[in-house]
Image (cartoon, rainbow, N blue to C red):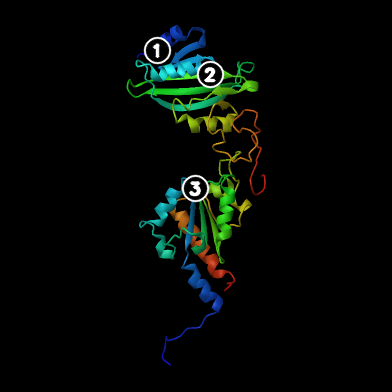
């Protein structure tokens, strides 16, 4: 058998490697952070390099829930429902300070961090975060996906 | 029409229906009684010299903690009118007490008042008599109280799901 016709790996690592480069995001965009999300997703920063170039607008086809922008108490049940509709395996990214902590909206209307409602894997702070921060967060998410125990 | 002349004409036409008028840096304001309000608004819209076709804003102010106004009528409902034909503006205010916080609706004059009045009801708890659909606009139906009132506790949370942090 010639050189390079096979390689050895663990199944978990192989699946993790594949999954981290096929991130189908569901962009749950509610506020101004959406502009920065679009800037990141477009050709200048090109998140397709990370296999995350194809957002799906159905939660059933998505792997990663990108919560982009302020979540109000009125919107919270909707977010929870979208999260529940996503199929496993799934991850959640909190994009911007409003989703991480409520940001400066410490008031009657705003959820003080989406992790009070759904589990969050990666927090990207910033108001809004620079595309570099988003890409950094995306790569942290990739590391997390690759390193975790895979369910299949 | 020049703003000062507009206020003088309103005072002459409605007499005691106009409580006071003032202007500040070119903004002209007429404070009217609630009884005179529908007639004043109809006049502002239909009088050719005024021709306020547009209600640019309708909002309210809670004066309950305003220095010097603690004892007076608690709320002021504010109408911002604009005339496209004449390019002039007028502000009309009406004062209402907390225990009788009702103002006649302006939906039949300017359809845009529909959501404005629902927002004022939602945020301040001022009702608009004759409104066709007097539901909350921004908050959810389960929400108790009116969050822009000065006595709404700043840290009161009413989440639909999740903790009340």
Mark 2 lies on residue: B94
Instruction: Tell me whether circle 3 and circle 1 mark residues in contact (CB < 8 Å).
Output: no
Front residue of this view, candidates A48 and B57: B57
Whether pointer 2 and pointer 3 mark residues with C-beta atoms closer than 8 Å, the reply is no
The reply, left or right, for residue A89 in relation to residue B7 is right
Residue ID at (62%, 52%): A117
Instruction: State the image coordinates of residue A24 (x, y, percent, origin top left).
Output: 47, 63
**Discs 2 and 3 carry the same chain letter:** no
Q: Quadrant of residue B69?
A: top right
Q: Which mark is residue A30?
A: 3
Question: Where does the N terminus of chain A fall, quadrant-wise?
Answer: bottom left
Q: Which picture quadrant has residue A92?
A: bottom right
- The disc at residue B6 is 1
Chain identity of mark 2: B
The subunit carrying tag 1 is: B
Q: SS of the residue at dot 3?
A: loop
**Mark 2 residue element:** strand
| Marks 2/1 same chain | yes
Residue A50's spot in the image, x, y percent?
Answer: 43, 64
Q: Is residue B25 visible?
A: no
């Amino acid at each position: 058998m010639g050189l390079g016709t096979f390689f050895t790996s663990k199944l978990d690592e192989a699946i993790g490697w594949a999954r981290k480069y096929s991130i189908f995001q569901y962009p749950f965009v509610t506020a101004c952070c959406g502009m920065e999300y679009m800037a990141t997703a477009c050709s200048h920063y090109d998140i397709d390099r990370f296999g995350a170039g194809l957002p799906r607008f159905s939660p059933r086809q998505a792997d990663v829930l990108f919560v982009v922008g302020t979540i109000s108490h009125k919107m919270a049940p909707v977010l929870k429902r979208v999260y529940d509709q996503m199929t496993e395996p799934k991850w959640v990214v909190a994009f911007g300070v409003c989703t991480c902590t409520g940001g400066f909206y410490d008031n009657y209307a705003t959820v003080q961090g989406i992790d009070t409602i759904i589990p969050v894997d990666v927090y990207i702070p910033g108001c809004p975060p620079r595309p570099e921060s988003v890409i950094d967060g995306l790569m942290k998410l990739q590391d997390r996906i690759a390193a975790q125990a895979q369910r299949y | 029409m020049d703003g000062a002349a507009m206020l003088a004409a309103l005072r002459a036409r409605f007499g005691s229906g106009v409580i006071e008028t003032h202007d500040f840096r070119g903004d002209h304001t007429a404070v009217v009684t609630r009884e005179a309000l529908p007639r004043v608004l109809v006049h502002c819209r239909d009088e050719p010299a005024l021709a306020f076709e547009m209600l640019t804003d309708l909002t309210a102010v809670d004066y309950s903690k305003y220095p010097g106004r603690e004892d007076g009528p608690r709320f002021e409902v504010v109408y911002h009118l604009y005339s496209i034909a004449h390019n002039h503006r007028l502000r009309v205010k009406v004062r209402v007490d907390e225990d009788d916080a009702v103002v006649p609706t302006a939906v039949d004059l300017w359809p845009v008042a529909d959501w404005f009045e629902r927002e004022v009801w939602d945020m301040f708890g001022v009702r608009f008599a004759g409104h066709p659909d007097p539901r909350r606009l921004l908050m959810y139906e389960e929400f108790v109280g009116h969050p822009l009132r000065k006595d709404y506790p700043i840290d009161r949370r009413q989440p639909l799901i999740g903790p009340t942090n």
